Image: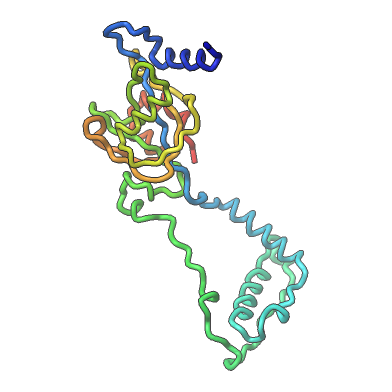
Amino acid sequence: MFTRTAALRRAQRVAARGFNTSTVGYESSVRAGVLLQRDPIVTQPAGKFEEATDRYFDWLQFTSADRFPRDFFFKKGSTAESKWMEQEDIRASEWFFDAASKPVVKSVKRVIHEDDMIEKSEASKPIVIHSRETEADTTGNEQSLERKLDRTLYLVVKDAQGEWMLPQGKVNDEELLHEAARRNLKEMCGGKMSVWMVGNGPVGHSKSGEASTFYIKGHILAGQAKANEELASEFKWITREEVEKTVSAEYWLAVKDMLSTI
């Protein structure tokens, strides 16, 4: 029975073929591509206003909180108590208003005898915060996914004509757009990537001559691209700003609205 679902699927296939009716020698003017991205791994650095706001609210919480019963939670003369007293003095020294109105704050520190000190344990060692800049950032390796950790990276390839673009290719007969997009990505960039496609509908398109390319959005979950030399000589994982510098001006105007500013 000819159901509504079957009718919709047939209509999609016709659209994906560029309304091709199996005419001999006719080549579809519709192409399918993939907007493949790696999402940010770490949060972006806080700006000056954000840092000041965080410090102000920390200070408000400190000044309005009840007195902390340190004698109950810390052993007298312990390393933990010493560190807490140092942090308490730092917090008490914060003042965000007129310096003349700053109240006199008495230090909570007290003399700690050498006999009362205990050896530093693993738990008392300071937390080491690693740099946001990775080895790939230092060496300028644009093929690595371990770069620009606080930015969204997009996969671009250099095709056989030497043009940089998003992975794309033709739509075969009886093939849907999202099916063609997956196939073209695999043929051009290898099958070693675990990719999640957001949906079956395109998020944008570009036009070159009579051909229109529709892009399906995807996220890389694992693996890495490997360019098929017959279809793509190189690939890069780059940010929005780097995409603008890499692709042609005409192509950038067509795809820029699909790219995130983060």
How many tags in the picture?
A: 0
Q: From the viewer's side, name the closer residue of 164 and 3.
A: 3
- Residue at 74% across, 66% down: 63
Q: From the viewer's side, name the closer residue of 161 and 22.
A: 22
| Image vertical order of residue 52 relative to residue 28, above or below | below
Horizontal relation, residue 199 to residue 54: left or right: left
| Image vertical order of residue 29 relative to residue 122, above or below | above
Q: Quadrant of residue 230?
A: top left
Q: Quadrant of residue 113?
A: bottom right
Hey, which residue is sitting farthest bottom in the picture?
A: 115
- Residue at 64% across, 77% down: 85
Hey, which residue is sitting farthest front in the picture?
A: 1
The reply to whether residue 206 is in sight is: no
Q: Position of residue 121 (x, y in %)?
A: 52, 79
- Residue at 65% across, 74% down: 89
| Image vertical order of residue 117 relative to residue 42, above or below | below
| Image vertical order of residue 80 relative to residue 180, above or below | below
Q: How is the image coloured?
A: rainbow
Q: From the viewer's side, name the closer residue of 154 and 222.
A: 222
Q: Position of residue 180 (x, y in %)?
A: 38, 25
- Residue at 69% across, 79% down: 108
The reply to whether residue 86 is in sight is: yes
Q: Position of residue 225 (x, y in %)?
A: 32, 41
Q: Position of residue 134 (x, y in %)?
A: 38, 55
